[in-house]
Structure formats: structure tokens, C-alpha cells
Amino acid sequence: MTVMQGLATGGGLTIRGTERGLRVHRRDADSKLQIVEPKLDEPLKADDVLYVAKACSDEGRRTMSLQQFFLILRARWKIALGVLAIVVGTAIAASLLLPKRYTASTAVVVDVKSPTQSSAH
């Protein structure tokens, strides 16, 4: 029986399950647990347990942890660096090409008090 046939036997995938999250838990000759990411045409062995990951939350939104964000950023560092270079280059170009406008305003308050006379001479 293949993974696809095993899924069909179990009732197939629903809207909550995804093929991308398939895992097979299998014991090797030493009874150690191995977790395999199978292809749909891969045969299942005796005592294999097939797990289907949840596609997304009930609201249809997925959340991402900070670690996942940094892993994605690390995997796509060239794109992130390119976007940063474009933004910085655009800011520098705008700063150099736009006309300079300097305006300033101030208010000065002068409070003149008469000197006090001291009684001790």
C-alpha cells in the first residue's frame, strides 16, 4: 500500500489537512523511531503510522514565530539585501536631487528688571 492509498483508506485529506505536512513514523530494526517525509507514491511498511499536519487554523490565518521569520530571512538574504539597497539608494537620491529648503523661526523674550539697590555700603 502506498502513502496515497493509505490516505484514501483513512478517508482522504480534508480542508484541514495538507500533503506538505505528511510524516511517517516507523521503527527500524533496533526499534528506534524514525520520522520520514514520504512521497505519495512511496510504499508504507508494516506498523507505519501516517501523520497528516494541520493546514491552517480555523480562522484561515497562520502565525509565524520569530525563529521562522529569521530562518526565512536567512534563506532569502539576497532578496532582503536587494530591497534594503533599493530603499537606501532611493532615499539618498531623493535627498540629493530634491531642492534644499531650510526654514527656521525663533522667539526671543527679554525681561528687563531694574537693578536692586543694596543697603550696605
Image: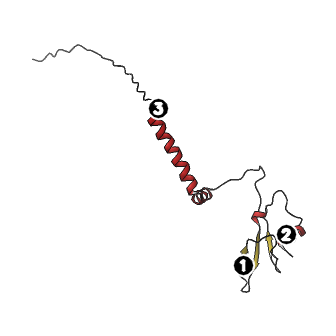
Q: Quadrant of residue 6?
A: bottom right
C-alpha separation, residue under disc 1 versus residue under disc 3? 65 Å
Give neighbour class at mark 1: few <14, some 14-19, many 20+ (Cα, 10 Å).
few
**From the viewer's perspective, is 47 left or right of 103?**
right
| Spot occupied by residue 71 in the image (x, y as percentages of width and height) | 60, 60
Position of 108 relative to 15 (above/below): above
Mark closer to the chain start, 1 or 3: 1
Q: Quadrant of residue 43?
A: bottom right
C-alpha separation, residue under disc 2 versus residue under disc 3? 62 Å
| Spot occupied by residue 19 in the image (x, y as percentages of width and height) | 79, 63
Residue sitting at x 87%, y 64%: 12
Residue at which label 1 appears? 33
Q: Nearer the viewer, residue 83 or 43?
A: 83
Give neighbour class at mark 2: few <14, some 14-19, many 20+ (Cα, 10 Å).
some
Give neighbour class at mark 3: few <14, some 14-19, many 20+ (Cα, 10 Å).
few
| Spot occupied by residue 76 in the image (x, y as percentages of width and height) | 59, 57
The kind of residue tagged 2 is Met
Residue 98, which numbered label? 3
